[in-house]
Image (tube, coloured by chain):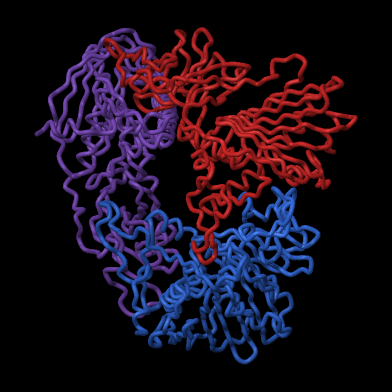
Chain colours: A purple, B blue, C red
Amino acid sequence: MAHDRDSESSPIDEGGLESGLTPLSPLRIKNRVSVVRIPGHWFVLATSGELTQAKPLARMLMKTPLVLFRDAKGVAHTLLDRCPHRSVPLSEGRIHQDGTLECGYHGWRFDGTGTCRAIPSLKGDCERKARNTPSYPTIEQQGFVWAYSTPGTSPQGEPASGVPTSRPHRFAFADDPSYVTVRQQFDQNGTLYSCIENALDVPHTAFLHRGLFRAESRGITLRVKVKRTSTSAEAEYIGEPRPPGVMARMLSPTGGEVQHWDRFLLPSIAQVEYRMGNENHVMADTALTPIDDFNTRLYGVVSIRTRIPVRGIKPIITALATRVLKQDSYMLEKQTKTIHAFGGEAFVSTEIDVLGKHIWRLLRAAERGIESVPGEQDELELVV
Amino acid sequence: MAHDRDSESSPIDEGGLESGLTPLSPLRIKNRVSVVRIPGHWFVLATSGELTQAKPLARMLMKTPLVLFRDAKGVAHTLLDRCPHRSVPLSEGRIHQDGTLECGYHGWRFDGTGTCRAIPSLKGDCERKARNTPSYPTIEQQGFVWAYSTPGTSPQGEPASGVPTSRPHRFAFADDPSYVTVRQQFDQNGTLYSCIENALDVPHTAFLHRGLFRAESRGITLRVKVKRTSTSAEAEYIGEPRPPGVMARMLSPTGGEVQHWDRFLLPSIAQVEYRMGNENHVMADTALTPIDDFNTRLYGVVSIRTRIPVRGIKPIITALATRVLKQDSYMLEKQTKTIHAFGGEAFVSTEIDVLGKHIWRLLRAAERGIESVPGEQDELELVV
Amino acid sequence: MAHDRDSESSPIDEGGLESGLTPLSPLRIKNRVSVVRIPGHWFVLATSGELTQAKPLARMLMKTPLVLFRDAKGVAHTLLDRCPHRSVPLSEGRIHQDGTLECGYHGWRFDGTGTCRAIPSLKGDCERKARNTPSYPTIEQQGFVWAYSTPGTSPQGEPASGVPTSRPHRFAFADDPSYVTVRQQFDQNGTLYSCIENALDVPHTAFLHRGLFRAESRGITLRVKVKRTSTSAEAEYIGEPRPPGVMARMLSPTGGEVQHWDRFLLPSIAQVEYRMGNENHVMADTALTPIDDFNTRLYGVVSIRTRIPVRGIKPIITALATRVLKQDSYMLEKQTKTIHAFGGEAFVSTEIDVLGKHIWRLLRAAERGIESVPGEQDELELVV
């Protein structure tokens, strides 16, 4: 039973190639692509700083235009970015002095629940269910504004299915003063799946980030333990000596063995954790937001505690992360272009694509609103 | 019977929202959009000045490429902008000295009826029905070139269904020397319906054109009488004091009550008329031409007679009209973008959207070539 | 039987117009367009100089992305431009020192047969059929790299149907020292069919290339003999006096009669041959490569032998050819735009479109992998 889920056909199964499509290109991969649209989960839509009191903020989540605004008390709200009257975006309007969001075309005003509170020129009561707009549960914490991907009110203004049963992810060390925490955001032209796998993939670092992050292979064999729950997947790398390269030397001047975990947490957290000794600790979380099927925004929060406090570590980490992310973005853009040129994906995996299949199955189960029952634990080897 | 037509389902009916499409966006509005394509009616394709004797002029009408040219006598003609030989646009050719339109690729020549008159290099007679191109009845009057939206000759060169039973609209005061007449053209990124409704809509002026055209609400209640015929709809506003704002002060320095009518005339004339006393009179006609489903060209003709002759009124009117049209264009562009983002429209109307439903029903009936039987007269109130 | 093929319906048949589609545009030509995709034939993908030892070269052939590279011995190879692992283009990678093509994302390496030879980080043997990528027979000759349009290896790395039964076209006088040979390449925005017909079409030269190539008609009647084989079509023009215009005067200062052949050779060679007397000889071959359905790359090889050796003839020929090709490209771009505006083609031909129908039938038969049995020879007249 459990294994039914894990063995299902997916765009990343091996052997996805079939012959016969055209004489020139013998692939038959049309319309197979790792796109998911996930209801009932929290996604970052903006940083707290981006959402000012002064004006509404347009955001796209899974192809749906949303608008964020702060009411008179500064509380953040998320509505569908569309006035029910004449289909113009509410984000083109302004915040009324009463804290409602006012449409720029005819001046209809909406509160944070999406209820229509005023229609200028209209005599009598403006409130009717058809004049409301869907709203989405919104939580602001740790400097991010998160929205729930199922509306909390229906277009008729009634409580809808979107009553959150969970809370947004917390960045474990972002508020810990013994850590240096760096935040960064970046857009990638790739599916949510491809961006998550890229963020948690070890083998590509030696090639795409040659010399920057890892050097060419030193021929060291690591053991990898893969653990699954119904909401997460983790790869633990055992036997990894301190890697060469700038970031590692900075982290641990005296060398030693590295503890290293890569984790995926539903719906879209990629977490990379490193420990070297008791005092060196890196926790790099990336919250990924699917803007549309092929564009993903990454909100990165990297918390670092080093043996010796390093002054001015933030600019170095930021510069390094920017270079790595630019290389990843470039390659993901080329991947996306290729997927479109062929009309779909056909990924062939090997056992060292350790987390890919787990990420895909967790995403697909979340898309369908079902639970992904984990299979057996994997244990395998990988050469670095 | 009459009311069957008026009560039909349309994109602008209230209650167009349904739940269920995706978890994120609970709208089900795919493929519902206020696009009409209207046969058998006259549309402005160019001003007389734009169509020179020197070269043909390419125009698009309801997504169909047309070419205008003047023959040796200066008479304007309209043909399908496509050579039947190799599908190149005739508008890339030139006017031959014999007054035919010559294709730039192989030199085929067509007269104003679309008949092929010459094929260079070909021995013998060139005339065969398959070599003709459709032509459209064309009338030039009051400085505009109008074409009929059903061809007058079939591709086989035979008289087709497009024998006009009507004449183009006349601008009533454009030739009257006691009026100052200003002409202007402008492109808007919106459906024909949305552009017409926008041109005749009162409530949006206080918001979109804040301070420019009307000020914020003064809380005055107007009565509105709505009259329908089978080819027009009219809203008469009763009890409107002189509005504040630049244009109104210019028109009537002493104040007084305003008589105000907004009219829609099939297929696409938006007419706004103001009277203040016996001598102040504004007649602002806009002839709208659907270029394609979401782009509309507006040809505006504003005739003004003021109590005291105002020297240099033209530049002021032109500047004001340009600002208003830019704001409208901006909002219509955002509306169009939103309609595409959601895959369709869902307009929710109130009783102060006084002309919208009538415009839509008249356009839909004209599209189907049937007569729209008007319903009861409306009378309602609106606060300005 | 033979005539069945020649009489089949095609986008270029006369009488392709039907009435009824919309009131405005009475054409019904949706989805009829002269696009072909031809398996089992050779196409030029690059000049020898464009394909360096230093890095791979991305090319598109009939909408399929291909990558060219040279192995350690300098031999050219063609693979599908897509890593089977994660769908990124191999052309973003680099040539490994062992002569394999290395993917830039995870470092998978492929030899010239498309076999996967290395997967970094993976313990054990990397070779499995699903990890190979299709390869295409490649031949380099006379300064061009040609690829076969059916892969020689399947995605499973096994010999596939693409075993060439032919060799690429040879440019007959390109290596002959008694000829001056000029090479040129140019992109045109048109279907393969439209670009070939344009290259071999006589009547358009008097209009599109007015004064440059041929002058206005002199009223001379030529006889045209059209010959067909199952792989070629030829038009021989008899009775043509030396044309006026720069190119002709340069070729033959003393005048005389011109022998002139236009030939189409499958899959995509357009050949124009002129002889004047025994010593003046022009052989202009164009090898056309369909990049995608509406974009075609032209590789021109013009070999000229003149009565009197003309110093510095190359720059003049190049400049003339560039102007002619720019005019053709402009018109083909407008044609393509018009075809898209109408949703398809409807070409009406006359008997002086001497080669068009033969080119189309040969291309369509090649697309289907069948033999086009020629009909009767044509003989007709044409006025120049």
Note whether residue A75 is visible. Answer: no
**Quadrant location, the C terminus of chain B:** bottom left
Note whether residue A25 is visible. Answer: yes
Residue A41 drawn above or below residue A329 = below
Q: Residue at x 24, y 64 (%)?
A: A157
Q: Position of residue A358 (x, y in %)?
A: 22, 30
Residue C135 lies left or right of residue A10; in this view the side is right
Residue C62 drawn above or below residue B105 = above
Q: Position of residue A142 (x, y in %)?
A: 29, 41
Residue sitting nearer the eye, B142 or A274: B142
Residue sitting nearer the eye, B252 or A162: A162
Residue sitting nearer the eye, C238 or C34: C238
Residue sitting nearer the eye, A50 or A82: A82
Residue A234 drawn above or below residue B125 = above
Q: Residue at x 66, y 83 (%)?
A: B173
Residue B96 lies left or right of residue A104; in this view the side is right
Q: Position of residue C214 (x, y in %)?
A: 79, 41
